[in-house]
Image (cartoon, rainbow, N blue to C red):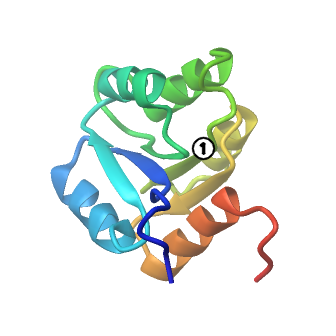
């Protein structure tokens, strides 16, 4: 049971598809405060101002893809510590490897399985937890 005095961890979900953001919000809202961004530029601004506890990041977005957002987050001393989990429809192992090489903590494929997403988020926010 969560204490009402303890703020919920903040998750920043970044996706250019509003329906995907709605799915993430529904899955996580009971345990986390979910903020959303519709593109990488907005995500970087939010991350620097509000320092979320974790970022869920789509790979394929216009203007700035998720890989570039992750690279910028990891190059900034203010945001480099924030765990990033890529959420993507990309199934190629090279794409997964690129995300991990850029500093992502995990890589979850779409369509999003609620249990997989919740487990990935819990693992990043509570590294001491075991399966």
Q: Residue at x 51, y 69 (%)?
A: 117
Task: Indicate the secondary structure of the residue bearing disc 1.
Answer: helix
Residue 111 appears in view:
no
Residue 94 in which image quadrant: top right
Q: What is the x, y in percent for residue 75?
A: 66, 16
Which residue, given by chain and number where applicable, does mark 1 sit on?
A: 95
Q: Position of residue 30 (x, y in %)?
A: 36, 74
Q: Is residue 63 visible?
A: yes
Q: Quadrant of residue 27?
A: bottom left
From this view, report whether residue 118 is shown above or below residue 127: below
- Front one among 99 and 74: 74
Q: Position of residue 116 (x, y in %)?
A: 55, 75
63 versus 84 height, above or below: above
- Is 115 placed above or below 100 here? below
Q: Is residue 73 above or below residue 121?
A: above
| Residue at the image position 41 percent from the left and 22 percent from the top | 49
Would you say 105 lies left or right of 14 here? right
Badge 1: residue crowd in 10 Å (few <14, some 14–19, many ≥20): some
> Image point 76% across, 83% down: which residue?
131
Residue toward you, 12 or 111: 12
Q: Quadrant of residue 89?
A: bottom left
Identify the residue at horizontal 33%, vertical 63% (top origin): 24
């Amino acid at each position: 049971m969560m204490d009402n005095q303890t703020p919920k961890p903040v998750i920043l979900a970044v996706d250019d598809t509003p329906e995907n953001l709605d799915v993430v919000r529904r899955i996580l809202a009971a345990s986390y405060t979910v903020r959303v961004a519709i593109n990488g530029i907005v995500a970087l601004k939010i991350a620097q101002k509000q320092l979320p506890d974790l970022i869920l990041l789509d790979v394929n977005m216009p203007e700035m893809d998720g890989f570039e957002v992750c690279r910028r987050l990891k190059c900034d001393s203010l945001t480099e510590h924030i765990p990033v989990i890529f959420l993507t429809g990309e199934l190629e192992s090279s794409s997964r490897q690129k995300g991990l090489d850029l500093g992502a903590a995990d890589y979850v494929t779409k369509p999003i399985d609620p249990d997989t997403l919740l487990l990935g988020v819990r693992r990043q926010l509570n590294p001491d937890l075991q399966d």
